[in-house]
Structure formats: structure tokens, C-alpha cells
Image: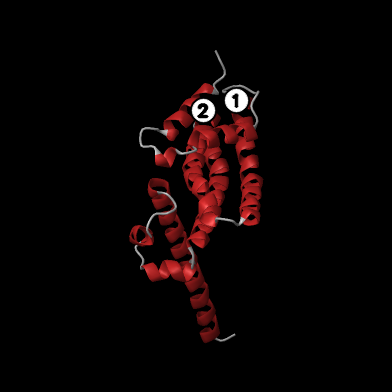
Amino acid sequence: MSDNGQNAGSAAASKRKDARRNQQTLLDAAAAVFVTSGVEAPVRDIAAKAGVGMGTIYRHFPTRADLVIAVYRHQVEACAEAGPALLAAGPTPHAALGRWVRLFADFLVTKHGLAGAMQADNAGFETLHAYFLDRLLPVCTELLDAAVEAGEIRSDLTAYQLMRGIGNLCIGAEADSRYDARRMVDLLVAGLREPR
């Protein structure tokens, strides 16, 4: 292969990497806006947060549902990847669980708006929910098991029960400024401590 062919291949790979990074930046910005303003937030707010034009968002995500679903999948992957990283970073399994639960709670604010954005696409919503459980239940289980093994938390709770409880604490949080779901979730995690 000539140098020109290698340079063209490198340039194409670099462009794909830049495009992925730009899309990640856009999804991070959209997630942040959704957490503070809900999934019906104006696209211009997302574009401003991401530092891109509105045309860029529409080019990647022609409809709001496309954007919300992409943010949803992006956040599921971020939560899935965060669990093991938080455990490895310490300082304790209970602290890692608490940090992960906060990420999960922030994600749930977006998730609760998903049903409205998808409207009547029940099959699509069910597929995403199954994906959510498949990716996040094992991560939550790993965090719980580590905290139980360390003797930090009680052992009579499953990952599904914990995730369901967190989900219930987060319902409607975006619509009531007097309710602090994150504080309630922190209290739940503190309450998991093994009595001494």
C-alpha cells in the first residue's frame, strides 16, 4: 500500500473517531439538559450546551424520540461502565454503590420522560426496557455483592429490588421543585448499612 493509501485510511479513521467523540459530546449535553429541563427541552438548549448548531442535532437525530432513545442508550452504557470503575476506585464498596446509585438516579429522570417521547411505540419501549435490565442488573448485583462481602450492608436485598425502589423514588422528581429525589436516594443507600 502506498503512503497515500495509508494516509487516506488514517484520515478516515480519525474522522470516524472525531464523529464518535462529537456524538458523545452531543449525547452528554442532551442528557444534562434532559436531567434539568426534561425530555421536552428545546433543541436549541441542547445545541448550545453541546456547542453545535441545531442542524447538527437534526442530522444525527431527525426526531426527538431518536434523540431521547440515543441518550437513553448512552446513559445505560455509561451506568454499566461506571459500576466496575467505581468499585476499582474505592474507597469502599458501599461508597462505590452510593456513587453508582446517584448516576442511576440521574439517568432515571431521562428514562421517565422516554415513554412520552416514544408515544405509542410500546414494542420499542419494551425492547429498551429489556436492554436496560440486561445491562444494569448485573452491574448493580456486582456492587451489592461487593458491599455485602465487605460486611458494609445488609444481605437481604436484590439488585432488582434496589433498582425498583430507586426508580419509585425518582418518579415525578422533575415536575416538583420541592422534592429532592437525589436526597431520598442517598437516604435509601445510607439505610442499607449493616447495623453495628
Q: Amino acid at mark 2?
A: Val
Please give the name of the residue rendered at 61% of the width and 53% of the height, measured from the top-left corner.
125
Q: Which residue is mark 2?
A: 189
Of helix, strand and loop, which one carries label 1? loop
Q: Which mark is residue 115?
A: none
Residue 89 in view of the camera: no
Q: Is residue 42 left or right of residue 66?
A: left
As measured in the structure, the alpha-carbon distance from the residue carrying label 1 to the one carrying label 2 is: 15 Å
Q: Which mark is residue 150?
A: 1
User: Label 2: few (<14), some or many (≥20) within 10 Å?
Assistant: many
Q: Nearer the viewer, mark 1 or mark 2?
A: 2
Residue 109 in view of the camera: yes
Quadrant that contains the N terminus = bottom right
Of helix, strand and loop, which one carries label 2? helix
Q: Amino acid at mark 1?
A: Ala
Please give the name of the residue rendered at 42% of the width and 42% of the height, measured from the top-left corner.
174
Rendered position, 15 above or below 71: below
Please give the name of the residue rendered at 55% of the width and 84% of the height, measured from the top-left corner.
5
